[in-house]
């Protein structure tokens, strides 16, 4: 008889998003379920040119083993960029990771024992939740509203779980809700983390994709006690296939993260790191980001207008100022999972909200819609189909 799976993975289920994406193999299905950047946002020709330059000048360096900490020029650029933004202290260190996902998973790896508590927003990014679950931790979800985590509930949780290790949060254009934590909430949450001695893991994959409103100071820039760990990525600003992200925090913590990475990936793809460095230093990166912001502003506006024109009034929506997602909520008396299931049968794929909850058995009345991946024509057609079906469903 084959040996059973380890406790770390025995309870893990396939990502609900990945399962739903199987339906999108049908070319007739219009997917609002993905979380991918817009295809037109990829700087394909620039990446091709820069890659050719790398292999012409430094082919062996691009193909050889490298150091775990990351490509030194890219790390130096990241440190300078973070310092300019007020997010890099004298005792800080940066390492390059295989996307922010690896920075997140590694944080749990080096901080948590089985049974330890991690606080997270409820709802939150399913990829991170599953990474945490793989270490046998207990996830404690914190209620949120459009302004972020409810601070009174956070303090109640801190009191109830005094040995909790860290709070995981996506403060900018949160996945899945699209909401942004206000400055006042960030300040209160940071004070509570300092008071009770827990880290904050700030995950900021969407921060550069702001297309409305004013930027809000990061937790990392507000931190004076060394309690904030910052996970960044180039997945949404260059290309997710590069798998280039980074982790910033106090040297003692990040140094331990280096050891943690050495047991898994040895180092992040060095060619991708060299390419990323050439891009941010030889291309006008600010202008590149402006172009992305214009793309996402247009796609969000198109979907928001289509929803307003086609959907019944009983559904409410978040109003993100950036990022990739809209969070829709249906009346409590209806079955959200039944709605999403029937929607995909009508050839429109959505992600049910319970996929993003810390308690996988909890009930949700919301679903996530992605506006970055579909074309303009798919947005128009998909929302029209969804609206006609919704008017039947919510009679």
Image (cartoon, rainbow, N blue to C red):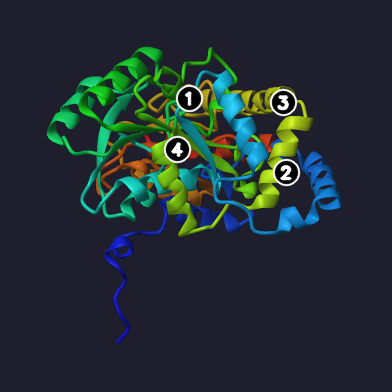
Relative to 244, does residue 89 appear above or below in the rendering?
Answer: above
The mark nearer the N terminus, 1 or 3, is 1
Quadrant in which the N terminus appears = bottom left
Residue 119 visible in the displayed image: no
For the residue pair 119 and 253, the one nearer the viewer reads as: 253
Viewer-nearest of discs 1 and 3:
1
State if disc 2 and disc 1 touch (CB < 8 Å): no
Mark-to-mark CA distance, 1 and 3: 33 Å
- Disc number lying in front (4 or 1): 1
Q: CA distance from mark 3 to mark 4?
A: 25 Å
Task: Specify the quadrant that holds the C terminus.
Answer: top left
Inspect this view and state whether residue 314 appears: yes
Q: Position of residue 199 (x, y in %)?
A: 32, 33
Residue extending farthest bottom: 1
| Residue indicated by mark 4 | 368
Q: Nearer the viewer, residue 277 or 243?
A: 277
Q: At 37% from the left edge and 21% from the top edge, which residue is drawn?
A: 146
Residue carrying label 3: 291
The residue wearing badge 1 is: 90
- The residue at the point 57 percent across, 34 percent down is 371
Mark with earlier residue (4, 1): 1
User: Relative to the observer, which residue lies in front, 97 or 240?
Assistant: 97
């Amino acid at each position: 008889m084959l040996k059973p799976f380890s406790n770390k993975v025995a309870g893990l289920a396939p990502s609900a998003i990945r399962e739903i994406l199987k339906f999108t193999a049908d070319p007739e299905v219009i997917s609002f379920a993905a979380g991918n950047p817009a295809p037109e946002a990829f700087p394909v020709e620039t990446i091709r040119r820069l890659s050719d330059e790398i292999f012409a000048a430094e082919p062996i360096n691009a193909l050889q083993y490298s150091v775990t900490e990351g490509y030194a020029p890219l790390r130096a650029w990241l440190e300078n960029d973070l310092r300019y933004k007020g997010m890099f202290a004298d005792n800080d260190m940066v390492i390059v990771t295989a996307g922010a996902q690896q920075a997140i998973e590694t944080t749990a790896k080096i901080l948590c024992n089985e049974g330890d508590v991690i606080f997270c927003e409820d709802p939150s990014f399913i990829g991170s939740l599953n990474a945490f679950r793989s270490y046998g931790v207990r996830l404690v979800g914190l209620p949120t509203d459009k302004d972020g985590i409810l601070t009174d509930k956070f303090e109640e949780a801190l009191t109830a779980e005094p040995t909790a290790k860290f709070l995981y949060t996506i403060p900018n254009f949160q996945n899945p809700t699209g909401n942004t934590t206000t400055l006042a909430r960030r300040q209160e949450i940071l004070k509570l983390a300092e008071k009770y001695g827990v880290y904050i893991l700030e995950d900021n994959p969407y921060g550069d994709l702001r297309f409305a409103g004013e930027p809000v100071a990061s937790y990392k820039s507000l931190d004076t006690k060394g309690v904030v760990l910052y996970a960044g990525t180039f997945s949404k600003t260059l290309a997710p296939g590069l798998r280039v992200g980074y982790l910033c925090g106090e040297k003692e913590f990040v140094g331990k993260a280096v050891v943690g990475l050495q047991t898994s990936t040895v180092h992040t793809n060095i060619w991708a790191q060299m390419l990323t460095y050439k891009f941010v230093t030889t291309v006008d990166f600010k202008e590149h980001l402006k172009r992305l912001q214009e793309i996402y502003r247009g796609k969000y506006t198109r979907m928001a207008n289509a929803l307003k024109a086609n959907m019944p009034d009983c559904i409410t929506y978040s109003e993100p100022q950036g990022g990739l997602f809209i969070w829709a909520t249906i009346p409590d008396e209806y079955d959200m999972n039944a709605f999403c299931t029937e929607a995909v049968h009508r050839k429109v794929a959505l992600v049910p909200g319970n996929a993003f909850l810390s308690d996988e058995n909890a009930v949700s009345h919301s679903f996530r819609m992605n506006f970055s991946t579909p074309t303009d024509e798919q947005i128009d057609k998909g929302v029209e189909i969804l609206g006609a079906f919704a008017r039947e469903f919510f009679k």
